[in-house]
């Protein structure tokens, strides 16, 4: 009886193994979408994935793809687990003639893929996450993190605080608080803040939040109540954000002086706190809401995700991500042949020469949704990194500032220093970008 | 010498200097501890009655809260939703008993532990299939305001939601204690906890007892889920709070209901005191993840059965 | 008939004491090893080799380690992830600071460091047992990960905190980091697997292995017959942590190519524990079967709809994957609580009589 079972299992395995060999031969521009619609980070992963995939479907249906080349999107769910993310990437990268570009949306997976994708000649577009020093295109030819990096964001947030307080001089002698996830991601901006603190004469207290749960914040907020910082800056992700917003509201901290980074300021972070969250601010590099031309085109279109997420911060961010890739494909086709499928290597070239002006963005119907972006060989975070500050009004996120530029004079040397260390440890000879 | 001063003396100087902060930290710690206890209670109930370390208890909390909030979002009245959710948890208890526990009766504890992990996986997928992965806020009118209490030495902040959690926990423990001591079912449960075979031989139906225990644990999970959900919004990350309940279990003992409460209070107050007076100034903070475990480990050196644990673990 | 022991006589003690006494077993193992060493690199695709076999083999080492502790010595541990992290961080630290040291020395060295840490966290096992001990080992899990994230020394003060795997070579072939060739990487990992599995198999039937099992089966009786619990339990912790440390180092350097804390979180500890239990407690073979089963089943469930041409939403697949995974675990426990290794054994016993069972 058991033997029989084993034989059956063997037969089943053999059939499965045979099935692996079947490769679909559909033609098109292939987009592997690494998503996490399940697991503890699903609240952030679902809208991002929806926005990302919907935009490609929109381009396919509205424009028939790019010059007739349609996008093929295949999702692979990895639940924010690094090893599954790597497996997903490996599973998808050669399908349909090869991946165009990959956006993992996770710190761990991005780091794991940096060298791998470089070896495979698949560009990574880690939009505002992953390795900050990848902005140095000489060391990281295949990794892009435009429109801005964490370090640029940190300086821009400080710039915003200075603007609110009445100029950079006003920072002198102030005390701020920095709440972060106790994980490499959360610790990223600390060197930048250290430099800024020295430069402008302010102090700041660091409050790590334990990583395993992200909800252990009572001590943090008791300390904050005691130290009374002028502003709080937060680098959080997942359930940590909602907890922090709630605790801040509970201690009656002035929410307008509480600023989250762009992964700490979306709808699911403020909703659990209810009205207490009103006034909470966050950095962003994309507009929210549905008042953009592109959403008109999406109305009534089939094959998209249901419209519950549409207009949320992360959904729109996913769309911006897809829009960058679509424009890079367009640019690559201009150079390498219109109406033809372009390879990852060609898309890499396009990313590096991407120059989206305000008119280009207007033409795409994305004005206000994505920033003006110009990438160069030397600078993979874009030449004018800048952020917007948005504020939660109880129903929606409202953009309350114009673009606030980052202090590139502070950030760039740090990026080059870290990239140089990376190059040294990995025996990489930096490219020459002057040509 | 300076380091010794920083470790041994300075924190206490700070405590005395700022008594209002000390009191705030203590209250904050105790109230967090109550929240851990709510989760730990479910573990204790099942371990006490069946000797099973129910790893799925964390998911139970999430699953119960998901059902409750999901039903409410569909427009069901909160009380009705509460009742329906209890029904669901009872059905779940029944299913667990029939499909998992019965076929595995008499197996090693580690096998049963493993089986509960299987249950955890199943419920994780099942709960998300039913209700999706979005954050759902709980709005059941749990009082949520900041109260500022004026004490002789300064003003302290207390959250009414935390106090409410304390009341719920006290209520639950009282009800459970009464249930265990004064109802026939409760007495049967205690008999089973003491000795399965003896209980069987005097005619206590073991299987029904297990269904009841798992259902009660489901009810406790629902209470914990609502309290935690009110705090964080009901989302998948709720299942990780089980990690905070485990050191509570060790400290209090796996088999003691009062132990779960007292253990929770000790863990909560201890980790908050350590974080604020030692962790942040000396170690850079974020010590709460491990502090309770280290304390529990050291504590076990001296009292291997926990504070209130019944079984003496033999020395080796 | 296919598989028989009858008529196989041993004429010397050494033959009787051999690791695999039955020729058929021996040939099978040799053939399998030969296939793994020669056949797989020749025929397997890159995906199969690097994304499937490498992680499965590395996790097998971790499962072997935990099996020594839990399966042979009876000490339940949930600190596997932390010991793997110790191996990973220290391997990185040693490799980048003592650059002349060959990588095949670095990794065992990192394993030794993990072993030292394992001994420290094994001390409570002298007083406590069972689930109490399991929860106490969680102290290692949380404390060590906190330490590695907190102290920048471990990552050479890297600003990003997630350093890339340093590229190192063996015999002129790069084996760590992403630029390493697939075959080189696979064979490098495989070499460790073969060596460690061989050692584990022999340890288990040596004096020390027998004393572990004595402690597991009845510690008081073991003590009465003269087995000292302290060195026995601590040696199990040390060797188990050594295996986990090596696995962690390989995981970071050869699989995910970066040293990153989330790869070794509490879920990893649980995953390895599943492998050991589903594979079979106290079985070397079980560690491999369990690792393959637990790692591959979710991927299989996840990709299966794609193969048969169904297009299902990716989140639905994952939900189903979770449910099926849970159900299968319970199913396996009900059908065979002693794990896949036991199923294998039963199959062999049946084969002995096939095709004429009585």
Image: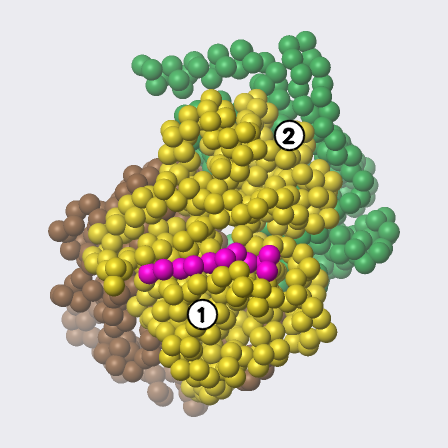
Chain colours: A yellow, B green, C brown
| Residue under the point 73% across and 24% down | B147
Stretch in magenta: A367-377
| Residue under the point 33% across and 75% down | C46
Is residue A376 on the magenta stretch? Answer: yes
Image-quadrant location for residue A260: top right
Q: Nearer the viewer, residue A417 or B43?
A: A417
Which quadrant of the figure contains the C terminus of chain A?
A: bottom left
Q: Is residue C226 above or below residue C323?
A: above
Q: Which residue in the structure is indicated by mark 2?
A: A253
Q: Which residue in the structure is indicated by mark 1?
A: A328
Left or right: residue B252 compared with residue B138: left
Image-quadrant location for residue A90: bottom left
- Would residue C315 be seen by someone viewing this image from the given angle? no
Chain letter for the residue marked with disc 2 in the picture: A
Q: Are dots 1 and 2 on a single chain?
A: yes
| Residue under the point 70% across and 62% down | A308
**Disc 2 crowd, CA 10 A, few/some/many (<14, 14-19, 20+):** many
Residue C248: % across, % down: 33, 54
């Amino acid at each position: 009886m058991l033997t029989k079972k084993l034989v059956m299992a063997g037969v089943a395995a053999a059939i499965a193994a045979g099935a692996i060999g079947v490769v679909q031969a559909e033609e098109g521009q292939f987009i592997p979408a690494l998503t996490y619609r399940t697991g503890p980070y699903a609240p952030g992963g679902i809208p991002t994935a929806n926005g990302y995939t919907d935009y490609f479907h929109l381009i396919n249906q509205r424009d028939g793809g790019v010059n007739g080349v349609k996008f093929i999107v295949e999702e692979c769910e990895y639940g924010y687990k690094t090893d599954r993310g790597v497996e997903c990437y490996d599973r998808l990268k050669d399908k349909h003639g090869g991946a165009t570009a990959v956006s993992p949306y996770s710190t761990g997976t991005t780091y794991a893929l940096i060298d791998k994708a470089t070896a495979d000649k698949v560009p990574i577009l880690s939009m505002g996450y992953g390795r900050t020093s990848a902005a140095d295109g000489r060391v990281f030819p295949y990794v892009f993190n435009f429109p801005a990096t964490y370090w640029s964001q940190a300086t821009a947030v400080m710039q915003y605080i200075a603007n609110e307080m009445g100029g950079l001089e006003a920072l002198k002698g102030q005390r701020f608080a920095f709440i972060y996830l106790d994980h490499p991601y959360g610790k990223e901006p600390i060197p930048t803040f250290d430099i800024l603190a020295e430069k402008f004469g302010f102090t700041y207290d660091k409050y790590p939040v334990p990583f395993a749960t992200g909800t252990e914040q009572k001590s943090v907020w008791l300390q904050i109540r005691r130290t009374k910082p002028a502003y709080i800056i937060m680098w959080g992700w997942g359930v940590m954000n909602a907890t922090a917003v709630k605790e801040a509201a509970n201690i009656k901290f002035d929410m307008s002086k509480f600023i989250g980074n762009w992964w700490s300021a979306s709808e699911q972070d403020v909703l659990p706190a209810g009205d207490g969250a009103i006034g909470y601010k966050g950095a962003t590099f994309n507009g929210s809401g549905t008042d953009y031309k592109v959403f008109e085109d999406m109305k009534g279109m089939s094959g998209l995700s249901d419209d519950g997420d549409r207009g949320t911060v992360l959904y729109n961010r996913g769309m911006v991500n897809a829009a960058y890739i679509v424009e890079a494909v367009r640019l690559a086709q201009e150079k390498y042949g219109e109406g033809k499928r372009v390879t990852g290597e060609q898309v890499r070239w396009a990313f590096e020469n991407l120059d989206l002006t305000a008119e280009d963005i207007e033409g795409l119907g994305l004005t206000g949704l994505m920033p003006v972006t110009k990438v160069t060989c030397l600078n993979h975070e874009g030449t004018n990194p800048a952020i917007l500050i948005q504020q939660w009004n109880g129903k929606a996120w409202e953009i309350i500032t114009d673009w606030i530029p980052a202090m590139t004079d502070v950030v760039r040397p740090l990026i080059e220093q870290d990239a140089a260390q990376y190059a040294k440890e990995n025996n990489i000879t930096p490219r020459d970008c002057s040509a | 010498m300076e380091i010794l001063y920083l470790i041994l003396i300075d924190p206490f100087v700070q405590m005395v200097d700022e008594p209002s902060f000390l009191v705030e930290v203590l209250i904050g710690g105790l109230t967090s501890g109550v929240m851990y206890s709510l989760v730990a209670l479910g573990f204790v109930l099942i371990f006490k009655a069946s000797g099973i370390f129910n790893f799925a208890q964390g998911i139970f909390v999430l699953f119960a809260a998901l059902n409750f909030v999901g039903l409410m979002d569909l427009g069901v009245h909160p009380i009705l939703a509460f009742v329906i959710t209890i029904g669901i948890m009872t059905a779940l208890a029944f299913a667990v008993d029939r499909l998992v526990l019965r076929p595995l009766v008499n197996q090693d504890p580690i096998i049963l532990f493993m089986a509960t992990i299987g249950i955890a996986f199943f419920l994780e997928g099942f709960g998300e299939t039913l209700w999706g992965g979005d954050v759902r806020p709980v709005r059941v009118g749990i009082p949520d305001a900041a109260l500022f209490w004026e004490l002789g030495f300064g003003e302290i902040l207390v959250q009414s939601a935390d106090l409410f959690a304390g009341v719920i926990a006290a209520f639950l423990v009282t009800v459970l204690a009464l249930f265990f001591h004064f109802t026939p079912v409760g007495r049967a449960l205690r008999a089973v906890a003491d000795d399965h075979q003896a209980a069987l031989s005097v005619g206590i139906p073991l299987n029904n007892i297990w269904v009841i225990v798992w259902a009660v644990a489901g009810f406790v999970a629902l209470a914990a889920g609502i309290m935690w959900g009110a705090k964080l919004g009901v989302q998948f990350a709720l299942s990780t709070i089980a990690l905070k309940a485990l050191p509570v279990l060790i400290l209090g003992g796996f088999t003691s209901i009062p132990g779960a409460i007292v253990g929770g209070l000790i863990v909560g107050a201890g980790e908050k005191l350590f974080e604020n007076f030692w962790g942040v100034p000396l170690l850079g903070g974020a010590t709460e993840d491990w502090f309770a475990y280290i304390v529990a480990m050291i504590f076990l050196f001296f009292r291997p059965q926990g504070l209130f644990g019944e079984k003496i673990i033999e020395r080796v | 008939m296919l598989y028989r022991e009858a008529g196989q006589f041993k004429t010397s003690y050494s033959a009787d004491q051999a690791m695999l006494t039955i020729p058929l077993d021996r040939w099978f193992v040799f053939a399998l090893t030969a296939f793994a060493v020669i056949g797989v690199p020749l025929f397997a695709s890159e995906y199969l080799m690097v994304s499937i076999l490498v992680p499965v083999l590395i996790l097998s080492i971790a499962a072997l380690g935990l099996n020594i502790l839990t399966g042979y010595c009876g000490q339940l541990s949930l600190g596997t992830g932390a010991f793997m992290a110790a191996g990973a961080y220290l391997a990185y630290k040693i490799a980048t600071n003592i650059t002349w040291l060959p990588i095949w020395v670095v990794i065992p060295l990192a394993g030794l460091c993990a072993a030292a840490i394992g001994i420290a966290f094994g001390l409570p096992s002298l007083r406590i047992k069972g689930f109490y001990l399991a929860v106490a080992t969680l102290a290692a899990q949380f404390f060590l990960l906190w330490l590695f994230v907190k102290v920048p020394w471990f990552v050479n003060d890297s600003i990003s905190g997630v350093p890339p795997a340093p590229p190192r070579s063996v015999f002129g072939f790069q084996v760590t980091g992403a630029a390493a060739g697939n075959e080189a990487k696979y064979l490098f990992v495989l070499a460790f697997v073969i060596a460690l599995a061989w050692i584990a198999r022999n340890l288990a039937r040596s004096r020390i292995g027998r004393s572990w099992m004595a402690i597991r089966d009845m510690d008081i009786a073991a003590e009465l017959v003269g087995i000292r619990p302290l060195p026995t339990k601590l040696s199990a912790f040390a060797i188990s942590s050594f295996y986990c440390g090596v696995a962690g180092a390989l995981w970071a350097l050869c699989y995910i190519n970066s040293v990153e804390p989330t790869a070794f979180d509490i879920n990893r500890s649980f995953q390895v524990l599943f492998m050991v239990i589903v594979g079979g407690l106290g079985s070397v073979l079980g560690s491999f079967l369990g690792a393959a089963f637990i790692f591959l089943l979710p991927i299989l469930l996840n990709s299966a709809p794609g193969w048969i041409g169904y297009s299902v939403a990716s989140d639905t697949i994952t939900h189903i994957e979770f449910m099926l995974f849970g159900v299968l675990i319970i199913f396996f426990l009900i059908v065979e609580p002693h794990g896949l290794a036991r199923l294998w054994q039963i199959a062999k016993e049946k084969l002995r009589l096939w095709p004429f069972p009585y």
